[in-house]
Image: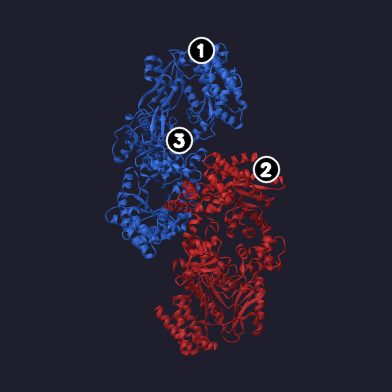
Chain colours: A red, B blue
Amino acid sequence: MMPKYVYTFAEGDKHMRDLLGGKGANLCEMVRMGLPVPPGFVVTTDACRAYLSTGHEPAELAEQLGVHLRELEARTGRSLGDPADPLLVSVRSGARFSMPGMMETILNVGLTDASVVGLVRHTGDERFAFDSYRRLIHMFGKTVYGVADEHFEQALEEGKQAKGVTSDQDLSADDLRTVVERYKKIFADHTGRDFPQAPHEQLQLAIRSVFDSWNSDRAVVYRRQERIPADLGTAVTVMSMVFGNLGADSGTGVAFTRNPATGGRGLYGDYLPNAQGEDVVAGIRNTMPLSQLAQLDRGNFIELVSIMERLEHHYRDLCDIEFTIERGKLWMLQTRVGKRTAAAAFIIASQLIDEGAIDPDEALRRVTGAQLMQLMFPTFDLERAPAPLATGVPASPGAAVGHVVFDAHRAAAANTPTILVRLETNPDDLPGIIAAQGILTSRGGKTSHAAVVARGLGKTCVCGAEALDIDLHAGQLVVGGTVIREGDLISIDGGTGKVYLGEVPVRPSPVLRHLTEHPTEAATDPLTAAVDRLLRHADYRRRLRVFANADTPADAARARRLGAAGIGLCRTEHMFLGPRRALVERLILAETDRERQNALDALLPLQRDDFERILAEMDGLPVVIRLIDPPLHEFLPSLHELTAKVATARAEGRDPGHEAVLLDAVSRMHEQNPMLGLRGVRLGLVIPGLFAMQVRAVAEAAAARVAAGGDPRPEVMVPLVGAVQELEAVRAEAQRVLAEVENAPHIPIGTMIEVPRAALTAGEIAEAADFFSFGTNDLTQMGWGFSRDDVEAAFFPRYLDLGIFGVSPFETIDKIGIGRLIRIAVAEGRTARPHLTIGVCGEHGGDPDSVRFFDQAGLDYVSCSPFRIPVARLEAGRAAAITKQ
Amino acid sequence: MMPKYVYTFAEGDKHMRDLLGGKGANLCEMVRMGLPVPPGFVVTTDACRAYLSTGHEPAELAEQLGVHLRELEARTGRSLGDPADPLLVSVRSGARFSMPGMMETILNVGLTDASVVGLVRHTGDERFAFDSYRRLIHMFGKTVYGVADEHFEQALEEGKQAKGVTSDQDLSADDLRTVVERYKKIFADHTGRDFPQAPHEQLQLAIRSVFDSWNSDRAVVYRRQERIPADLGTAVTVMSMVFGNLGADSGTGVAFTRNPATGGRGLYGDYLPNAQGEDVVAGIRNTMPLSQLAQLDRGNFIELVSIMERLEHHYRDLCDIEFTIERGKLWMLQTRVGKRTAAAAFIIASQLIDEGAIDPDEALRRVTGAQLMQLMFPTFDLERAPAPLATGVPASPGAAVGHVVFDAHRAAAANTPTILVRLETNPDDLPGIIAAQGILTSRGGKTSHAAVVARGLGKTCVCGAEALDIDLHAGQLVVGGTVIREGDLISIDGGTGKVYLGEVPVRPSPVLRHLTEHPTEAATDPLTAAVDRLLRHADYRRRLRVFANADTPADAARARRLGAAGIGLCRTEHMFLGPRRALVERLILAETDRERQNALDALLPLQRDDFERILAEMDGLPVVIRLIDPPLHEFLPSLHELTAKVATARAEGRDPGHEAVLLDAVSRMHEQNPMLGLRGVRLGLVIPGLFAMQVRAVAEAAAARVAAGGDPRPEVMVPLVGAVQELEAVRAEAQRVLAEVENAPHIPIGTMIEVPRAALTAGEIAEAADFFSFGTNDLTQMGWGFSRDDVEAAFFPRYLDLGIFGVSPFETIDKIGIGRLIRIAVAEGRTARPHLTIGVCGEHGGDPDSVRFFDQAGLDYVSCSPFRIPVARLEAGRAAAITKQ
């Protein structure tokens, strides 16, 4: 069968996005609904893919194009290139996923020296006709042949100067006729050929250039950033032109069925009389609110309102549209389910439930954890904000205020809050990035070094604010005439990319406040109420439990209020800091068993107290306590620091004293690769009594809680196990200790699965484990063979640029590689022990994209930082709602 | 069906080792052959396992023991405990694998106050009877009740002192009767019960104590060291006693069918008239060569020779036996395939082919790569060696001579060859171990710190030489009256564990010399001829190809002579050392693209020359060249060193100059975990032009070789790939470079599989790879999550002691965990690309135990250091011969 490469609008529908692109499929859908759409057809993504893979259009395409063009000419009663009354068409890209502004559009295809005369005759508007021709030559030259805008812009400017006017509107038909001649000359000079006077050739070249635009640099970068597959290709929509610039009874506009910023009900949009769509986009003239159309053209306003109501009812969601009124006749040029802010997403989803349009599961599918995350950051009080100085790429969320610093070392040394401002950052800047409140760059996008590192650190970041003219030598930046010097205060918004001069007041997140402080009360503002409603439905729907990573009683309490059903990771190493460091030092420097045991004995009551307070906060809920994981030398000063101190002391003739002793110990314990060294279970097996002390502290704390009438549910987790024999050895010792503590409740003993070999031998390990908890950070580090600390700054940005990652595997779980280890461990662990409890306690546990994977992989719970618990609850509910669908 | 726990000797055969143990199965076999074996029966390993898992003998055992005992009594015409003519039995352990001296034996079971009278009557030898009773009480007290030897030894000593004699032989029957009474008193004092006078109880307790001996500390340690599974259990052989100490027509001996030390043909053994076996073992009296038995007792000598010929013919291998002549009657007490030295193993295997006893495949199965490895080390010229001072555990092979040093720091600082002598070593001693020629300790076995580290470093090591009395404070060691001080010369033999005073002359290995210098000529000595013969058969039989890891023309030439069929790993980083370090420094410090490219341009001709010379040596054979792998900062001085230098210079008021610049660069490039940092393919993707320079050098070198009439076969290998996208990016660049070099041959591009994720996504990666080569060192490091450098010293000895490893996974591939990654990668790589070439180039490629795994896993080749090529060839042949069987 001959492949079908071209569909008229009547042949498609909204489900055919893969083949016809989003724009094409929705145009087809509007035609099926009987809405007024200018006639046209769609060239499929199949045709694009065939072209891109072979380098030429498939043979059948030309033939099918001819058939559809003749049909279009018949329907409109006009012919392409007709010198009497020509058919003109627009040629637009339209892919499966919206890529706004990333690909190409050419309007007025079909105008030639001959047909422009026909357009004059038909419209009676010579000025309009030559203006249209001028626009075609510019767009065609630029899009098909890559002639730079500036050549055309300069010629137009010269035309205006010659006439002594400043606005395009003041150019007459004759002026524009001259501009057209200049444009044709520019075209010929830059392309080596005359502007094509065969309208079919124009159409063919225009379609090809849309195909080619799929692989333009900016489209490639955009897809990489938005994680859109590279091999989809674009469809091409060919539609007969309608004109909003044919007089006062014409115009053009954009509209939304609800307010996309706030979610407020009712039409929302802009209208511009006597104009084309590109004028609205270019912002050359001021638009009027859509409501004013009711005064200008009541009939079309009523029709538009009716159409938009039908669209929203039909799509069961907020829609946006582009429309044109040509001499009193309303035409729909585009519709789609409209983009919206995070807040609007929640409010609209909740409204649509109330309106009976969707059920709560569908509402859950329409919001994302990433949106909820945005709503949990503080924001600027925009009513008290000045106009933004510039807008960049919103690379890492938050609202940061600080003094401008142009140098990372100065930022690192500053005593006041700073915003580090750089052209772009590199690994040398890391200390400054860590110290600053926020990072602002004038170059680079979401995969730039600054963006990747800031997200990793949870820092606010705005990248690629190209309007900033940064002069490091002069120590200043200039933007729109404003000069900002080092030390001046600025504010940057990581959620919107906006940059403000001075300190903009920061408003805490009402959502976060409600969830943290009054989780059981009804919310008073509509946004918080909507979030609360969907979170409750997510809780009802989800299979995954959500636990928290929490090491202190305060964190535990916060996590519980935010909805944690337990603690999935209570790290004990944080409990060895501060004044207890001295005890760890004694433990390390102990030369006899007795000295070591004395140090452990001194630590025991402190640890017991730690655990007792956390168990009290989490009474009745599981608390998974991980035995100490990091290498002990992390509790001593660094080798580097001690080396310099001792060398300095000796050079100055002083006795370095205790520092020399410490240096000796640290040198002896120094590891080339501490991540791969003596830590976790290895430490527990090599240092006698260390794990036993911790297990005893857990058991005694639990016994004390039982005695106090509590319901403690501690579990003991062994880190870094790679072989069942390690776990067996620790388990035997732990059980011996537990048996010695009277009145302790039953305490399960489980293991982290964070070493690749543990996942590969999970069937064996499950025999000795009451539960598994994936440590996805280490599993990612070891599975990929890179350490986050070392590589995130050094080569992740380059890897993101090369497309080796779509996203850092430390942000979102690598489903193919690391995910395979997880699937193996789940399957084989459960085969060995069918009721094995399995969770994840790495940072991925709170990553929206990863939570769905963990749900699919069959985990029982995810554990994440308290702040991310609502996000994980929502995503766990969405995972269930999506699976159910 | 009732389990059968007891077999008479007539019921078993040599194939029943699992059930009857090696000793029991071979006794059965001798009975089947009609040889004179004292009657008896075997209690199975099943019974032992049942006892060990439940803590008591299975119910059926007592019943079956009764039946077999009655049958034995009927056959011998004597009854256990009979006061007229008692049956006496020996009770011996015997497991599947030989564990010499590790478990228990009790002789003369059945003697009581009553039956000893019968023994007197029957033998007419009162002295003999009470000596036998004395021995039973001692062995029984020690083995069944744990009474210390010293109590019995002291009582015997006192008996001799009372009589005023020094030898046991001089004690009369009456004296021994008194000793028996003393022994019974000691027994009662230490056990709280009288010595059992019920002979059936004696037998039951003796069997139980043999069962228990399976889990004695020394047996557990031995099994762990020898990698014998812990759950096999032991069988128990019960045999009627025969006595070699009943006069001049009695005696006992051990014999081998060939010389187990040299492989020489002909009987070899020792005989001791009028003695029991334990006297031979104890070395109390001097034995005579077996040949003298021909004079003493020609009839039995001829019978013994005939039996041994039959045994060797039957077993088709060297056998050893224990025998006793009781009043002129020859009895066979034990036989087994005898242990032998590495040299004897090769010589005997070759002889047996000549004799038509075995075919070459069988010969191959009877020698091991580990034996061949021993033969390739230099040895001491034992004819010019003094008597050894002491013998320890041969923990790491080689022959080392050096000055005694008792302190690791002094060893590290010494300018002369040293032997580091310690009670035991710990991680602090590492610098000394690295610097020393060899390590000698007085404590610990094959899994001790010294042993593990020495094997990892390839250092000669003798451990646990308990006869050494080391006094660190006095700075001396005393052994057998000899005092050795720091600085004295000693020689240690890592192959035999022997320690010699002074410098013993070292003899290079004739095998290594032949294989290296005259591989194509016939060998002149029998050992080298035998090795050569079996190696040639291995080459004929093996499926695996053997490549070499070689970085220099000299190594390549050596590898080729040793039988390498190519270079599987040519590391290029070694080529950046020496004077070229300055160029790498320029590369690292380059601030502009131009400076960096200049540094690369300067490196290009040097690399091209490196490759050209290696390709010339390996003309016609593949040479797999790995692009640079280690982090660049490895080519600069260490951070630690620079920090101290700069701090010192500054404290002294000097300008640290260039060192401060270097410190700055090194600090910037410093990585917390360089193993997991910017190296391998990451480096190639981040530093523009680096890999391209290397690929160009390979291609230009190959083109030059073609121009010179050669047949260069280089291949390019990309290190540390974790994702196919990395390989695709490098491959695209490499192919662009290759296309630019005229007259270069086709150069395949493949990848290391050394990152776990690479193995897990091998199907994808194979699409972009012409070959795979496993880097098992990194795969082990990342799969287990520990770095060899950091952990081998820190916790491997502890892990070996705990049985977490049977052997370091860096010595022998971890088949369960890391092996699974290899199997996954092989299967999925070949599915994606059926003719994918797959090899291994980690150190495991030359490990005997690992080579068989690689054969089974379906690899095409192993690549190892030149020295190990013969070992790999042999093991590859054995793998095929074993599979064929």
Rendered location of residue B848, percent (x, y): 42, 40
| Residue A186 seen in this snapshot | yes
Disc 1 marks a residue whose amino acid type is Asp
Rendered location of residue A176, percent (x, y): 48, 87
Seen in the picture, residue A344 relative to B676 is either above or below; the reply is below
Are the residues at dot 1 and dot 3 in contact (C-beta closer than 8 Å)?
no
Q: Earlier in the sequence, mark 1 or mark 3?
A: 1
Seen in the picture, residue B370 relative to A157 is either above or below; the reply is above
Mark 3 or 2: in front is: 3
| Circle number at residue A744 | 2
Seen in the picture, residue A252 relative to A432 is either above or below; the reply is below
Question: Callout 2: residue from which chain?
Answer: A
Rendered location of residue B853, percent (x, y): 45, 42
The residue nearer to you, when weighing A56 against B524, is B524
| Circle number at residue B175 | 1
User: What residue sits right under mark 3 in the picture?
Assistant: B423
Q: Residues within 10 Å of mark 2 (few under 14, many from 20)?
A: many
Q: Residues within 10 Å of mark 3 (few under 14, many from 20)?
A: some
Judge if badges 1 and 3 mark residues of a common chain: yes
- Quick check: B752 left or right of B509? right
